[in-house]
Amino acid sequence: MGTEDIYSGLRASAGAIEEELIALRRKLHSYPELSFEEERTSDAVAEWLNGLGLDAVRRGVGGHGIVAELAGSRPGPRIALRADMDALPIREETGLPYASQVPGVMHACGHDAHTAMLCGAARLLADRRDRLAGSVRFLFQSAEEINAGAKAMIEQGALEGVDEIYGLHNLPTLSAGQAGTRFGALMGSVDQFEVTVTGRGGHGALPEQCVDPVVAASAIVMALQTAVSRELSPFSPAVVTVGSVHGGASYNVIPERVELAGTVRTFSPDVQEQMPDRLARLAGRIAEAYRCTAELHYIRHVPVLLNHDDQVRRVEEAIDAVLGRDNRIEAPPVLAGEDFSVYLGRVPGCFFWLGSGPETGAEQAYGLHHPRYTLNEGCLAKGAALLAAIAIRNEFPDANLHSDNKKRSRS
Ligand code: NI
């Protein structure tokens, strides 16, 4: 059997289970669960996997995570495929018949779809295990939205023995049926910070008796922007956003303190490393100039998502084979984060975008994390086939095993 036959076989098999994948995704969509609470979701995944005759299914890994193992018929590398399972604290406003039945919780990032796609890939690969070299490890992960699930799974051994890892995220601004990734940095680092500015409160009409933290905090908000605009190259993308300012309760009282909270995104590990010191210096010295003190609490979430070259090439080959070269785009970099980056810091791999939007030319879909976010379910079977295709190249570890070498010279 030649390479082309393998890929067309995967496409056909994925098409044959499309209805089941849609049903599974809708079931997950109706019962979204927040980070580290994905109990019912993991039950549904376990139920699906149980029918496939996998070699091992470990539950409760890093929260409600599932690690499942499929061994091929010959030795080879162990390839991990990962999907995230958690939903968001958003009230769904899509009006869909299978909309969330959990008040205030919604699969607004499409992790229900990612989970369904990986279930589909497991089915496609399990059906082909006699022709699979090496093994595939399926990682169903908790708590991506709070940047905690990947670390939790790794701590419990999810990456042990893994040679390469792959994962995807749906993208509603890209048509279903298209996909893409990029070499090097694809997504930004994510950090969080809090600054407590302390002065001395008092009467709003008597500033000479007070030390005003509101004015100091205002100056700090402005100054923090210079950590990017005046200290980094314009060719080195980074963002400092203060998303929360809290202080005072009355129009005529100078408060004792003001609390700022924000996020830092960067596109290079070096820049990420330097940001805590920059923010501490700016906040501390600006506060001092205004006779206040500022205390910085800096929380590192996830590193820059750095794809590995060989694995990017592998994903691009799979996209070309499954979706067609015309449907492969070069993904633009974004500063949004993804805790898949934690895996990529340990083993080589690649993260990629899969289009989940309307067909080209149709009206623009709502974006990720929007209460009206919807997903073109046409992406489910395509994603399942693509994930399976990425893992199944192991089918050809040795050219001598096959007679139709010419067909496979592309790799
Ligand atoms: Ni997401």
Image: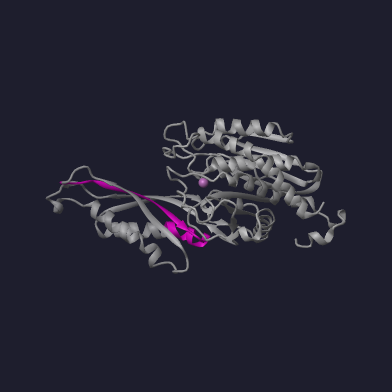
Total labels drawn: 0
Q: Position of residue 120 (x, y in %)?
A: 66, 41
Q: How is the image coloured?
A: one colour
Q: Position of residue 334 (x, y in %)?
A: 49, 58
> Looking at this view, is 61 or 349 the one in front?
349
- Residue 263 lies within the magenta run: yes
Question: Would residue 161 be visible to someone looking at this image?
Answer: no
State the residue at coordinates (64%, 50%). Answer: 166
Query: Is 66 rendered above or below residue 221?
Result: above
State the residue at coordinates (66%, 48%). Answer: 387
Q: Quadrant of the C terminus?
A: bottom right
Name the side, left or right, on which 215 lies relative to 391.
Answer: left
Name the side, left or right, on which 9 lies relative to 168.
Answer: right
Q: Position of residue 32 (x, y in %)?
A: 50, 35
- Residue 169 lies within the magenta run: no
Name the side, left or right, on which 191 lies relative to 386.
Answer: left
Q: Position of residue 360 (x, y in %)?
A: 53, 55
**Residue at the left extreme of this rendering:** 205
Q: Which residues are magenta?
A: 252-276
State the residue at coordinates (56%, 49%). Answer: 169
> Looking at this view, is 31 or 302 the one in front?
31
Query: Is 37 rendered above or below residue 201?
Result: above
Name the side, left or right, on which 74 lies relative to 119.
Answer: right
Question: Would residue 293 be visible to someone looking at this image?
Answer: yes
> Looking at this view, is 205 or 362 the one in front?
362
